[in-house]
Amino acid sequence: MGLPRPTPERTALADVLTPSSARARRELGIALLRTMIRIRVLEEGIEKHFLAGEIPGFAHLSIGQEAVAAGTCANLRPDDSIASTHRGHGHTLAKGTAMRAMVAELFARASGVCKGKGGSMHIADFSVGMLGANGVVAGGFGLVAGAALSAQQRKTDQVAVCFFGDGATNRGPFHENINLCAVWNLPAIFVLENNRYASTTSTAETMKIADVAVRAEGYGIPAAIVDGFDAFAVYDALAAAVARARAGDGPTFVECKTYRARGHFIGDPERYRKKAEVEDVMSASDPIVRMQATLGDALPQEDFERLWREAREEFEDAVAFARSSPAPEKSEAFFGAYAGDRDARDPVHGIEERERAAFLPFAPDLGTGSQGGAH
């Protein structure tokens, strides 16, 4: 099957749309831009506070990839599901998790969305359908297949979206779950953030195809390739995929050609690529700059600056909230592993009570919290 190619950089809205359609597109563009700016501010803030020692564990930033999260999640409802990667801050924010709850979680505080026990790579928010970031490469595919199967069996029109990187496409769960979703015609959407590197290895060294999306043909599902720096292009591709899934027509594969402007993790020495490469890509393709140019006169400079100011104020408020929140209590260490574990009538409660009793004498003082390390 033929694969659509990425479109070139878009011209200003006023040059290509009628006045009525331009207004609707402008509103969408500003919403996408607001989300991308919020993600950028969050990621830059995480980098700052991680390096200052306020955020424990490890953190992987998605600076440069904001258009994929924004364009995808703008098509989703709160009751739709997503599964993320170790690079999941942007997905989580775009899906609707509150900034305060996110930052408190990253700071390992009890007020965090996972009560300070998940952190960057294990953050989840079921209230908005965010099934979790994942420290295991390709770990989200099974979650999405399960969520899609649940929606099909319950006869809802919910969809499930799996975000993943190019490195995950060389692992077994990618193939197993796409095949399963194709055979059972499940409402799943597979969004590849092809940022050119699997950890520290270029995709050119790990596969002999230029477009990973060609693999979808082997499973009999449609695929599209889009410019992952163009939030409009991502939005449009996902709108079609979501409509198809809601109609009961099965899964779709969308490959977003993008780039990460930071290392694999905060502190990555990046010996595998040149600094000039990063600068060249971002100077030509920064998704925020791209959207500002596309909106053109439809977005006055003062409105653009206001979006940045509001995002920074929101982040600083979240940091203050996190700093004023307590660390998790030691007794909380085992809560949350099983459903019903807080109910004294549930058999699980007794099991965990015994585990807690054995653990607490040896538990460290959590202080500012303790979370998992890198994958």
Image (tube, rainbow, N blue to C red):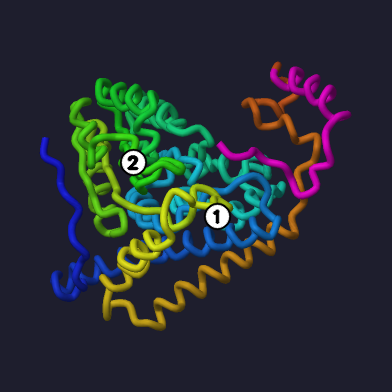
- Is residue 103 found inside the magenta-colored segment of the image? no
Q: What's the CA distance linking mark 2 and mark 1? A: 34 Å
Q: Element type at marker 1?
A: loop
- In this image, 143 relative to 219: left or right? right
- In this image, 93 relative to 80: left or right? right
Q: Which residue is mark 2?
A: 203
- In this image, 34 relative to 23: left or right? right
Q: Which residue is mark 1?
A: 98
Where is the C terminus found, in terms of image quarters?
top right
Residue 184 falls in which quadrant of the image? top left
Visible residue check, residue 287? no
Residue 81: where, in percent of width, then height? 42, 39
Visible residue check, residue 138? yes
The residue depicted at 26 percent of the width and 38 percent of the height is 212
Q: Which residues are magenta?
A: 348-375
Residue 298: where, in percent of width, then height? 28, 77
Name the mark on residue 61. Answer: none
